[in-house]
Each structure stands twice: as structure tokens, then as C-alpha cells.
Image (tube, grey):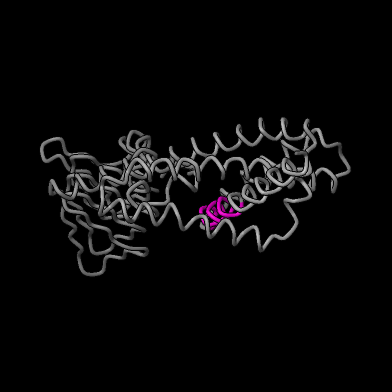
């Protein structure tokens, strides 16, 4: 029996939620059905698909049809709006059934697992909402990463041309800088919590959150520039590429699986503290000039 080889690649960030996994799984398996249609027994009257005892296939996908497995399916049987009947000597890897019933005869072997989801309107709505939310989160992270990269790259070039003493400050007193940023982070959080009870405070809260984000962006630029110069110095290259190295380093660190979001939050807090120290240094220099 001719076997069909199917290769699929998934981006690890696009399949964090199980709902997105199911959606991508169905899309990727769509080419399999025409490949197996000629080798499987199809009954047009009963809308059923049968794998005979002598057949051995890799995967089966059926939408709106029932499936009877009497032979061997080495990978997955995926059925949407249909029933799955497994014979006594059948061997299957995984069964995924949405909106149907699975019948297992004594002696049937399912090596990996059986997953059944009902077809109620609430369940389908929850699946659709979860899939859309996962795509929205993924899209937001892509847009945020692109914005941060462009911002750090552009502002890094401006900071490098001015040659301000902020680079040395970025690595001085790291604990004081971080705790200063952590203290300032409490203020927008406190006003946000108060706004939930007193809606009249939302203009003040919006201004405070906006100032917090702007200070974080400025601090990020300085921190990324300092990291880029350190990388360029380690590689023995000029400071012209330091903004690029810094932006890439921040982008890679904040997109590490599982802990990337935590690194981004810590980076924001540290950047706010760095901005406060820069503002203090700027104010002190202006007083000395007077």
C-alpha cells in the first residue's frame, strides 16, 4: 500500500493555546484527504469512509462524514461532524472527533489518546473566540516587537551621535535604578486600581500611564544603546553598529519562550528607573550651569 508522507511545520508562538493547535491541525491536514480518497473505501449513500483491515495509512481527515477504521492508521484520525467506529483489530495513534461519537470495539488499540469535543453552539463559540484571541495576542506581540525594534534602532542612532554620558550611567548602581523604577511602577498601578472604583479619575490615570510609558521608552533607548556598545566592544567593532546590536539583543531577550514577557516587564521597570536617574542628572547639570 502506497503511503502518503506529510510534513508540517508550526511556529512555536502561534500554537500556544490548544484552540489554535486544533485550528492549525485541521488546516494542515486538508491536503491529506484527496491523497487517501483513492485508497479508502467511500460509501456515498451513507457518507462514510472505511479503512479496510488490509489497509495501512498515515492519517485520515473527514468533515461531515463518519469513519470506520478496521485497519491501521499510524498517526491521526480527525473527524468533524461525524462518528468514528474502530474495529476490534484496528490500530490508531490519535483520535480527534468534534461533534460526533467514538465507538471502540473490544481489542481496538489507540496508542496516544482520544479527544472528543461536542458540537453545541456554546462550545463552538468558545473555540472560535479562543482561536481569535490567540491570533489577536500573536498579532499584538508581532506589532509590539516591530515597534520596539524600530524605536530602539532609530533613537539609538540619535543617542550615539550625541555621545551623552548616559552610557556609563546605564551600568552604574543597577539595584538603585531598578528599585527606583519599581517604586514608580506602583503609582500608575495604584491610580488604575482607584479608577476602577472612581471613574472620574480616568483622565489623571491616562496621563500618568502615558508619562510612565514615555519614560520607559526613553530609558529603553539608553539601555539598549549601552548593551549594543558592550556587544560591539566585545566583537571588536565600531560603535556605529551598536544601536543595531542593542535593538536585536532586546528583541531576542523579550521574545524568549515562556519567560520573554517577564523579561519585558523587568526591562520596562528598569528603563523607568534609568529615565529617573537621567532626569536627575540633567536637572543637576542645568543647576550647575546657572
Residue sticking out furthest to the front: 290
Give how far across and how far down residue 146 sits, in percent.
55, 34
The answer to which image quadrant residue 133 occupies is: top left
Quadrant location of the C terminus?
Answer: top right
The span picked out in magenta is: 259-270
Q: Is residue 261 magenta?
A: yes
Q: Position of residue 210 (x, y in %)?
A: 46, 40
Horizontal side of 7 relative to 263 (left or right) equals left
- Residue 208 locus on image (x, y percent): 44, 45
Residue 161 on the magenta span = no
Q: Residue at x 13, y 46 (%)?
A: 121
- Quadrant of the image for the N terminus? top left
Residue 282 vertical placement versus 94 (above, below): above
- Residue 53: horizontal and vertical position, in percent? 29, 54
In-image side of 199 versus 190 (left or right):
left
* Left or right, residue 10 beside residue 25: right
Residue at image position (10%, 37%) is 45
Can the viewer see residue 7?
no
Prevailing secondary structure of the magenta residues: helix
From where the camera sits, is residue 231 visible? yes
Identify the residue shown where x is 49% and y is 48%. Answer: 12
Q: Residue at x 67, y 49 (%)?
A: 280
- Indicate the quadrant where residue 2 lies: top left
Asked which quadrant contains residue 92, the reply is: bottom left
Looking at the image, residue 235 sits to the left or right of residue 144; the answer is: right
Is 94 in front, or is 43?
A: 94
Amino acid at each position: 500500500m502506497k503511503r502518503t508522507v506529510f510534513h508540517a511545520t508550526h511556529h512555536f508562538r502561534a500554537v500556544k493555546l490548544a484552540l489554535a493547535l486544533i485550528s492549525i491541525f485541521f488546516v494542515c491536514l486538508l491536503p491529506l484527504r484527496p491523497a487517501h480518497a483513492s485508497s479508502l473505501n467511500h460509501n456515498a449513500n451513507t457518507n462514510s469512509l472505511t479503512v479496510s483491515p488490509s489497509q495501512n495509512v498515515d492519517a485520515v481527515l473527514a468533515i461531515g462524514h463518519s469513519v470506520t477504521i478496521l485497519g491501521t492508521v499510524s498517526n491521526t484520525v480527525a473527524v468533524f461532524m461525524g462518528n468514528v467506529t474502530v474495529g476490534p483489530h484496528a490500530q490508531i495513534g490519535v483520535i480527534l472527533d468534534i461533534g460526533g461519537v467514538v465507538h471502540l470495539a473490544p481489542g481496538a488499540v489507540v496508542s496516544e489518546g482520544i479527544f472528543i469535543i461536542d458540537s453545541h453552539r456554546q462550545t463552538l463559540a468558545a473555540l472560535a473566540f479562543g482561536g481569535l484571541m490567540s491570533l489577536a495576542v500573536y498579532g499584538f506581540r508581532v506589532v509590539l516587537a516591530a515597534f520596539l525594534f524600530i524605536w530602539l534602532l532609530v533613537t539609538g542612532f540619535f543617542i550615539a551621535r550625541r555621545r551623552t554620558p548616559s552610557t556609563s550611567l546605564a551600568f552604574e548602581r543597577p539595584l538603585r535604578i531598578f528599585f527606583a523604577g519599581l517604586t514608580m511602577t506602583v503609582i500608575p498601578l495604584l491610580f488604575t486600581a482607584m479608577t476602577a472604583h472612581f471613574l472620574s479619575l480616568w483622565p489623571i490615570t491616562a496621563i500618568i500611564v502615558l508619562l510612565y510609558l514615555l519614560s520607559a521608552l526613553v530609558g529603553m533607548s539608553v539601555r539598549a544603546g549601552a548593551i549594543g556598545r558592550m556587544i560591539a566592544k566585545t566583537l571588536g567593532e565600531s560603535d556605529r553598529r551598536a544601536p543595531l546590536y542593542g535593538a536585536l539583543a532586546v528583541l531576542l531577550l523579550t521574545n524568549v519562550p515562556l519567560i520573554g514577557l517577564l523579561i519585558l516587564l523587568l526591562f520596562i521597570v528598569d528603563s523607568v528607573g534609568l529615565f529617573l536617574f537621567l532626569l536627575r542628572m540633567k536637572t543637576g547639570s542645568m543647576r550647575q550651569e546657572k
